[in-house]
Image (tube, coloured by chain):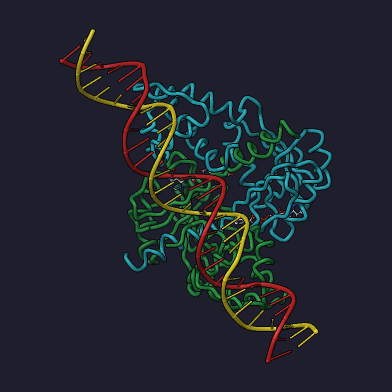
Chain colours: A cyan, B green, C red, D yellow
Amino acid sequence: MFVSRNITRLLRYRNSLKRMQELGFETVYSYNLGKETGVSPEQVRKDFSQFGIKGKKKGGYNINELLFTISDIFRKDELQKVIVVGTGNLGNAVLQYKGFLKNMIQIVAAFDIDPAKYKKKQTIPVYPLEKLPKICQELYIKTAILTVPESVAQEVANIMIKAGIKGILSFAPVVLKVPPHITIKTICIVHELESLIYQSVQVCDGSD
Amino acid sequence: MFVSRNITRLLRYRNSLKRMQELGFETVYSYNLGKETGVSPEQVRKDFSQFGIKGKKKGGYNINELLFTISDIFRKDELQKVIVVGTGNLGNAVLQYKGFLKNMIQIVAAFDIDPAKYKKKQTIPVYPLEKLPKICQELYIKTAILTVPESVAQEVANIMIKAGIKGILSFAPVVLKVPPHITIKTICIVHELESLIYQSVQVCDGSD
DNA sequence: AATTTAATGTTACAAAGTTCACAATAAATT
DNA sequence: AATTTATTGTGAACTTTGTAACATTAAATT
Ligand SMILES: NC(=O)c1ccc[n+]([C@@H]2O[C@H](COP(=O)([O-])OP(=O)(O)OC[C@H]3O[C@@H](n4cnc5c(N)ncnc54)[C@H](O)[C@@H]3O)[C@@H](O)[C@H]2O)c1
Ligand SMILES: NC(=O)c1ccc[n+]([C@@H]2O[C@H](COP(=O)([O-])OP(=O)(O)OC[C@H]3O[C@@H](n4cnc5c(N)ncnc54)[C@H](O)[C@@H]3O)[C@@H](O)[C@H]2O)c1
């Protein structure tokens, strides 16, 4: 139905709209929002149109209404529960991050195999990996952030899928092989950086 | 010339090829590599063809040769110097990461405004932000990883650009406004997660 | 040496996504 | 009330990306 590209833009709009709302603005034009999010005004209108969002001829779009509709699309009325698997450097950074709750995402538990990492006392408890299936099933958790070393990512992903996880956001630079009903997103920081360097430094070399 | 999408696939091929090389394989077929990287064999061949990489009609592609050519495309003969700006949770995770050097990327310095973060003694020194322009110019640094709070991201980006930075990999969830000759890549972890949840949990709700 | 086979490489086709152009229209102005 | 204006909404054109089909060719087999 709605593809990832559209979704991403819609989330960007939401970010900007929230800021505008905080600043006291009530309406926005496709032109403003486009400028703010780096999207053409036509694209903004088309996206809204596709999602059934209506504006007023000459008056633009109502920000509250927009935010309400977008939140509705993302079911932001209910808290989305997520776990973190692998509490190393990156996993810990994610655990510390305060920005998830604002977006109705709650990290409810973390897992590791290193006993030195287990901490039940803190806000987000860190459990041994073996407890993952039980906890995921008890709390109906369907989404996980995977921050384990590359070498074990596939194996840990398999365990999570067996435990009922349906979506995995992985930071390990490997293509995870999973059944078709499982959704994987991989953030490969090194590739992003390499690709950036290619585009910014190397392509410019000649002309710059 | 070559767009981001192609570049990303090429980097994925490289990862897989390296693993194959380590396992002692000498040749690979478009079919194998496609399976490994989640790309169709036709696409693999097309990509290689576009980058001027030739295979053998029945013998597939030579892995060493492939890696050599891909490395050449990415100028992997020279170390790419990068800085990290903002050494909080995420910035520190990036600083600790050992996987960059393998890909010919070296983080040479980091910057923060919090004096508690300054550490000149460690492998990668952390300097006050004011030193950024001088150090970037002395070391000819063109690429930065930006891990400062959202609220100051634009302002810090401006400083970096003035200091000669051409490419920024930002983790702050804002659209940075920069001149056209500057390349920005934004990794928005929250959006990736939200979009994953939308695709995996919510879309499946009805049928699952 | 001729034939079959298993791969590459390319061309044509299809789908998706974006931009463009402009019609529609509500608000503002005269 | 008529006209102008500023903005939305959308159909068509264009562009990009991916898929499928197939022609090509080097190796293997007969
Ligand atoms: N840190 C970065 O900046 C960075 C950059 C690019 C990619 N990555 C990728 O992100 C992932 C995590 O990176 P990191 O720097 O946090 O690594 P890390 O080594 O700091 O952390 C890995 C954690 O996973 C745990 N672990 C190991 N095996 C496990 C298992 N079987 N089950 C559960 N937990 C297990 C370890 O105990 C450790 O706590 C890696 O795949 C890495 O390649 C990280
Ligand atoms: N940690 C995560 O998992 C996560 C997830 C999503 C997005 N992000 C984004 O990544 C960025 C960094 O996140 P974090 O969790 O590491 O934050 P953090 O607060 O832990 O770190 C921010 C660092 O930036 C420094 N800083 C502040 N102002 C500065 C300035 N003007 N110049 C230089 N340094 C400055 C601070 O001293 C601090 O060390 C933020 O924009 C955040 O929104 C982080």
Kindly identify the residue that appears in the image at 83 percent across and 43 percent down. Answer: A131
Choose top left, top right, bottom left or bottom right for residue A39: top left
Residue A78 is situated, as x and y percent measured from the top left of the image, at 66, 26
From the image, which quarter does the N terminus of chain A lie in?
A: top right
Tell me: A156 left or right of B30: right
| The one of C24 and A188 positioned closer to us in this rendering | C24
Figure check: B9 above or below B117: below
| The one of B180 and A46 positioned closer to us in this rendering | A46
| The one of A68 and B36 positioned closer to us in this rendering | B36
Would residue A16 be visible to someone looking at this image?
A: yes
Kindly identify the residue that appears in the image at 44 percent across and 25 percent down. Answer: A21
Choose top left, top right, bottom left or bottom right for residue C25: top left
Tell me: B134 left or right of A48: left
Residue C28 is situated, as x and y percent measured from the top left of the image, at 26, 17
Kindly identify the residue that appears in the image at 55 percent across and 65 percent down. Answer: B46
Residue B148 is situated, as x and y percent measured from the top left of the image, at 48, 46
